[in-house]
Image (cartoon, rainbow, N blue to C red):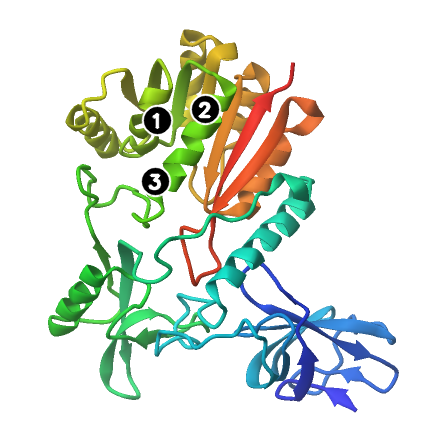
Amino acid sequence: MSLKLGDKIILSIHDLAFGGEGVGRIEVNHDLNIQDSAGNEPVSPPVPGKFLVVFVPLVAVGETVEAEITELKSNFARAKLVRIIHASPERVQPECQYFGDCGGCQYQHIAYPEQLRLKQKQIADLFERIGKIPRAAITPVIGCPQPYGYRNRIMIRSQWNGRAKRLEIGFIRNDNKFVEDISECKIAEPALNEQIKAVRANPPPKGGIKVVLRLQPEGWDVPKDSFFQNNFFLLPELVSTVKCFLSESKVKHLIDLYCGVGFFGIEAADAVESFVGVEYDALAIKAARQNATLRQVSNGQFVAGKAEEVMPELLQQYPVDQTAVLLDPPRKGCWPSLLDLLRTTRPAQIIYVSCHPATMARDLNILCGDGVFELMRVQPLDMFPQTQHVECVADLRRRN
């Protein structure tokens, strides 16, 4: 027999990879020739007697499924789900009518407690592989009290559908090519679904336009394009985790890098004697100062500038053995020059917050290299239920 695009196979799903795809394997033997869509063998075909890994979305661990091959490489394949032969007991009915077509969610078909268990395992796998970090350092994921209707910010897109001669308004499909037309989003807060209705009633003039819908956090000044956490319901746990780490290290000062509108510095102000927030976005810094005034926080200051440029001067102002540095970088992680500076100056503690575990694991590996810092633990928080994403907070301490 030959394996080619469009072939249907039976798979047993034994794991879910980070990103949400199920993992199955098919044996490649002497009677099996891997061919591309033109019937040509790839340059490096799989070794006979080995197993080819096949990734399938929308499945659960322990399931037996029928899947159709959509992509073939020399060492793996991808397939789309055709039908469930034996379902997992953790499989549930998705709440969203667009799930499976819309690319926003990956886990609505899995019971929420199982989602948390899977995310903890996926993070541990990722950190062990990329950061050489022991699995025991990853604590169980803190769940969201509201797994649906939690997002306070979404971005919907418009795309002209030439075949149907209409404007599609919604989210990118799971094939990353087209827009799935939607009338509501089950993971968005109800007020945002009302905003979606308003956009559909007054659509953009053409395709290719993005519309950002967001709810302002109560008691915070947040400029239009400035960052704020997108889940109000789990914010108390996120703040509690950061303050717990600060309390355990007994530091007196906090340098909050990538501080945005000052959220972490202001919320953790009562856990330290003084703090300073650093942010490149001048509008966000202006808002941070306003937020500190609104919340009557007077033991901090805010500085506009790039983290890697401002840090050397700040570390001369604060005794490093009594100072914690909080990192909440963009998804691409920290600049190498900043990581080098932290390794050289060695503050007492680094608290690293990230929604991108891969870049976080990479940066933690650098910071902990040669025994400069020690990773105490990583606390994941499910700020993004029903999706592949997860927030992590890491506690690093300077080694004596």
State the residue at coordinates (58%, 17%). Answer: 344
Residues tagged 2 and 1 counted as in contact (Cβ below 8 A):
yes
Q: Amino acid at mark 2?
A: Leu
Relative horizontal placement of residue 64, taking residue 220 as reference (left or right): right
Q: Earlier in the sequence, mark 1 or mark 3?
A: 3
Q: Out of 3 and 43, give the one closest to the viewer.
A: 3
Image quarter where the C terminus lies is top right
Q: Amino acid at mark 1?
A: Ala
Q: Earlier in the sequence, mark 2 or mark 3?
A: 3
Residue that mark 3 sits on: 236
The amino acid type of the residue labelled 3 equals Pro
Which residue: 31% across, 29% down? 267
Which of these two is toward me, 70 or 161? Answer: 70
Tag 2 residue: 246
Residue 220, image x, y percentages: 19, 37
Mark with earlier residue (2, 1): 2
Taking 26 as reference, is 190 left or right? Answer: left
Check disc 3: other Cα within 10 Å, few if <14, some if 14-19, many if 20+: few
Q: Which mark is residue 54?
A: none
